Image: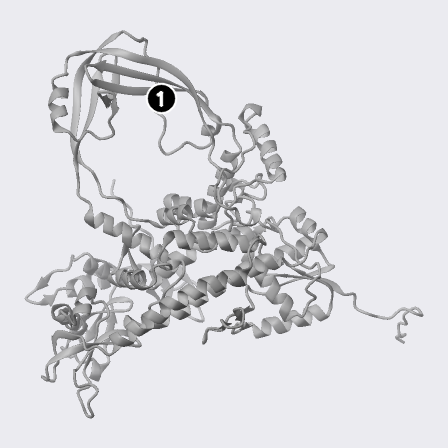
């Protein structure tokens, strides 16, 4: 017989309440819950839960800019679950990211859960480690409303600009265009640089070097005591040529003790710059990979956060981290390699006094973590780990021998260096290595002969276009945006097609130029670099509690509204203008006119508005239109439109369907493809292998008598693939034959039994002949 278990008198069977910790991401929740143990439940909000509505402005500009927040689509269930967890919890901790946006997320969650405003429930940590997490739990604080208001102000500023201006751009340019308080200034920087490049006039100069007796290699340095950067006066070249085989006097020969300090730890901007330069990562990819390293990975069965918070403009390193580095350096390098504490010399305000980006545990070397990280994670972690170690190492010390040889008014100079102590060079050397060698036995007053001159004629080069790396550097230098915004700015410029990418360089598109010109003409404050930078400083003042956020918005909006009202009148006037093109309408009723619609600019018949009129329309997507022509009321696009219409119709190929119908070569959203000339009837289309698409892109396909010759290439690829399938034999798992699959990394063998059988095989590369 089973006896019923009875509880002791006076004891109720009540579930013990847990402490609830709310973080932003599930990966972070997993790590933190393991650290805090059974008394804590850690759940994720998946980022923001409330925001301004997408369908309207959502800001009451007449009532102290009161925002109208609504639950983000899809987050209703998240809030419901958070409320359920909160009811069952004894204490709630808000642990969103340690920056202004994270503070705002905590505030929004507190409102959704109806938590008390004066409650100490906000915790923050710069790294996901046991010490940092447990220390934050011991020291909760109130939500910092100054930081929240700074973030609200930024969000509302961006909304006022975006909604106020973008809707007008839709009417005068295209519906996919937008204005952004920061992105538009970044676009201006790119366009202004392009203008400099276009206007650049090369200047001829001469690079002058000389081989002197005693194995000395010197460079022309001064003429008549004036330092020469580039020699541009040709008359001097003739005089210098006459000096060959002549004696010079040593007028300076001195040794100077020098040192080079190790580079600073990484911050967001330098991380993005180095990841772009060394690893080829985009800014968005860098931040995505860094987020994964911050949130942590499984290492020997334990989930570990590997780096500190990656959105920071600080290079400060905590005492604990410095001690960690000190122990590592003493153990692996020795006392003499230990660097001194560095102080930040930045003139700009450092947001929230974060640390720089560093590994949470320097003993977790890249070599140790190789088996736990994917290729991209390992590359970025190695960059962060090495830079942190290097930043804590001692300076490199060296002696520099400076030598100047003089004859008449010409000075030739050279330096040779001798490393006395390698310091941080032991781990990392700068890209421009110091020229090192033995010091010559020579002194002031000695003679040396100019044995041979090397005079190279060249021309000055135009400035280099921005890359992601140099654009981030420029934005930071100008004080535009903040660490969390750089990647978003760049992605918006690319997504909106305001810039084209050639190699790694940004080139403004015709659309980008048009947007820039319209904004610069009508919104000079928005497009002013100094104005935008000063606004960032004012947002910093709000975060520091030194400025009222409503006052900031009031001053900004008063000026913005004046510009918007003026622009609105101009847009309405432009909408009523008839702008004629040089493109005859197929209906024969004169030339077509320019229109702007939901999908951008297009040409329409001039009697479009008439009842029963011609409905012919031609999209102008991809057609560059000179803004000056629009102002003058007549655009010239006929030739370009004909090219686009011809390409849309397709080019004839030597490939045919089974019944002999010709396949046409067309270009769609995903690149080149083949389509039957009778597609409306037979619905036949054929994708092209990547090998052929690449040849088409590089203009390597022969066209004869208007026919693109690709059939032989298709047959050759088909033969090779059939051969590979035959050699592979049947699938070893299900016995069905393989087929050729194409993925991100190229071709592979895929079982035709998919989805029941998901077996795949790599295709072995052919061995090279020795």
How crowded pointer 1 is (Cα within 10 Å; few <14, some 14-19, many 20+) is rated as some
- At 22% across and 61% down in the image, what residue appears? 692
Of 448 and 646, nearer the camera is 448
Rendered image quadrant of residue 407 = top left
Up/down of 83 relative to 218, above or below: below
Q: Is residue 50 left or right of residue 173?
A: right
Q: Is residue 770 left or right of residue 534?
A: left
Outermost residue toward the bottom in this view: 611
Expressed as whole percent of the image width and height from the top left, the position of residue 451 reads 17, 15
Expressed as whole percent of the image width and height from the top left, the position of residue 27 reads 57, 58
Colour scheme employed for the rendering of this structure = one colour
Up/down of 243 relative to 687, above or below: above
Up/down of 678 relative to 397, above or below: below
Expressed as whole percent of the image width and height from the top left, the position of residue 565 reads 36, 71
Count the labels in the image.
Answer: 1
Up/down of 186 relative to 755, above or below: above
Rendered image quadrant of residue 697 = bottom left
Q: In the rendered view of the protein, which quadrant contains the N terminus?
A: bottom right
Report helix, strand or loop for mark 1: loop
- At 12% across and 28% down in the image, what residue appears? 234
- At 54% across and 69% down in the image, what residue appears? 64
Q: Which residue is mark 1?
A: 436
Rendered image quadrant of residue 758 = bottom left
- At 64% across and 71% down in the image, what residue appears? 81
């Amino acid at each position: 017989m089973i006896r019923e278990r009875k509880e002791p008198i006076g004891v109720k069977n009540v579930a013990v309440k847990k402490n609830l910790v709310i973080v932003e991401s599930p990966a972070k929740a997993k790590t933190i819950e393991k650290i805090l143990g059974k008394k804590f439940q850690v759940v994720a909000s998946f980022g923001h839960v409330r925001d301004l509505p997408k369908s309207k402005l959502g800001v009451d500009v007449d009532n102290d800019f009161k925002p109208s927040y609504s639950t983000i689509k899809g987050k209703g269930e998240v809030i419901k679950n958070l409320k359920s967890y909160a009811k069952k919890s004894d204490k709630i901790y808000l642990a969103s990211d340690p920056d202004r946006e994270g503070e705002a997320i905590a505030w929004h969650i507190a409102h959704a859960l109806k938590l008390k405003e004066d409650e100490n429930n906000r915790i923050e940590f710069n790294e996901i480690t046991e010490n940092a997490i447990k220390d934050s739990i011991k020291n909760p604080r109130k939500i910092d409303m100054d930081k929240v208001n700074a973030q609200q102000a930024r969000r509302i500023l961006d909304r006022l600009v975006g909604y106020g201006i973008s809707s007008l751009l839709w009417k005068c340019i295209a519906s996919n265009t937008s204005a952004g308080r920061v992105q538009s200034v970044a676009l201006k920087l790119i366009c202004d640089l392009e203008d400099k490049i276009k206007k650049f006039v090369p200047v001829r100069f001469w690079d002058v070097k000389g081989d002197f007796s005693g194995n000395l290699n010197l460079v022309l340095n001064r003429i008549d005591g004036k330092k020469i950067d580039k020699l541009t006066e040709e008359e001097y070249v003739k005089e210098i040529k006459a000096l060959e085989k002549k004696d010079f006097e040593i007028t300076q020969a001195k040794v100077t003790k020098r040192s080079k300090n190790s580079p600073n730890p990484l911050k967001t901007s330098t991380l993005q710059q180095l990841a772009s330069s060394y690893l080829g990562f985009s800014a968005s990819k860098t931040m995505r990979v860094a987020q994964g390293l911050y949130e942590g990975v499984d290492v020997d069965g334990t989930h570990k956060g590997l780096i500190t918070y990656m959105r920071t403009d600080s290079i400060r390193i905590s005492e604990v981290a410095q001690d960690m580095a000190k122990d590592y350096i003493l153990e692996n390098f020795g006392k003499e390699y230990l660097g001194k504490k560095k102080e930040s010399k930045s003139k700009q305000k450092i947001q929230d006094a974060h640390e720089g980006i560093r590994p949470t545990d320097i003993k977790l070397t890249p070599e140790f973590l190789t088996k736990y990280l994917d290729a991209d994670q390992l590359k970025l972690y190695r960059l962060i780990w090495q830079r942190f170690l290097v930043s804590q190492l001692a300076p490199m010390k060296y002696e520099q021998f400076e030598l100047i040889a003089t004859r008449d008014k010409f000075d030739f100079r050279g330096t040779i260096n001798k490393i006395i102590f390698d310091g941080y060079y032991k781990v990392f050397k700068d890209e421009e290595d110091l020229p090192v060698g033995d010091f010559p036995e020579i002194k002031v007053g000695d003679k040396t002969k100019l044995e041979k001159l090397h005079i190279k004629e060249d021309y000055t080069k135009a400035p280099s276009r921005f890359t992601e790396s140099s654009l981030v550097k420029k934005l930071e230098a100008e004080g535009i945006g903040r660490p969390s915004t750089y990647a978003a700015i760049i992605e918006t410029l690319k997504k909106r097609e305001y810039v084209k990418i050639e190699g790694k360089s940004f080139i403004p598109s015709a659309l980008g130029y048009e947007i820039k010109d319209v904004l610069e003409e009508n919104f000079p404050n928005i497009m002013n670099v100094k104005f935008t930078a000063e606004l960032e400083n004012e947002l910093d003042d709000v975060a520091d509690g030194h400025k009222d956020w409503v006052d900031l918005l009031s001053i900004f909006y008063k000026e913005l509204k004046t510009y918007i009202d003026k622009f609105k009148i101009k847009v309405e006037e432009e909408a009523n203008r008839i702008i004629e093109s040089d493109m005859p309408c197929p209906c024969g009723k004169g030339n077509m006119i320019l229109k702007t619609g939901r999908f951008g600019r297009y040409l329409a018949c001039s009697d479009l508005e008439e009842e029963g009129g011609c409905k012919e329309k031609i999209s102008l997507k991809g057609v560059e239109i000179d803004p000056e022509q629009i102002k003058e009321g007549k655009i010239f696009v006929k030739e370009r439109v004909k090219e686009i219409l011809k390409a849309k119709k397709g080019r004839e190929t030597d490939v045919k369907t089974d019944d002999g119908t010709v396949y046409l070569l067309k270009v769609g959203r995903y690149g080149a493809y083949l389509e039957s000339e009778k597609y409306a009837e037979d619905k036949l289309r054929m994708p092209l292998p990547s090998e052929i698409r690449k040849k088409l892109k590089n203009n390597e396909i022969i066209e004869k008598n208007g026919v693109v010759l690709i059939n032989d290439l298709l047959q050759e690829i088909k033969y090779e693939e059939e051969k590979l399938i035959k050699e592979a034999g049947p699938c070893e798992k299900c016995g069905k034959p393989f087929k050729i699959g194409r993925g991100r990394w190229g071709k592979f063998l895929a079982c035709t039994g998919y989805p029941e059988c998901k077996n795949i095989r790599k295709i072995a590369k052919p061995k090279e002949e020795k």
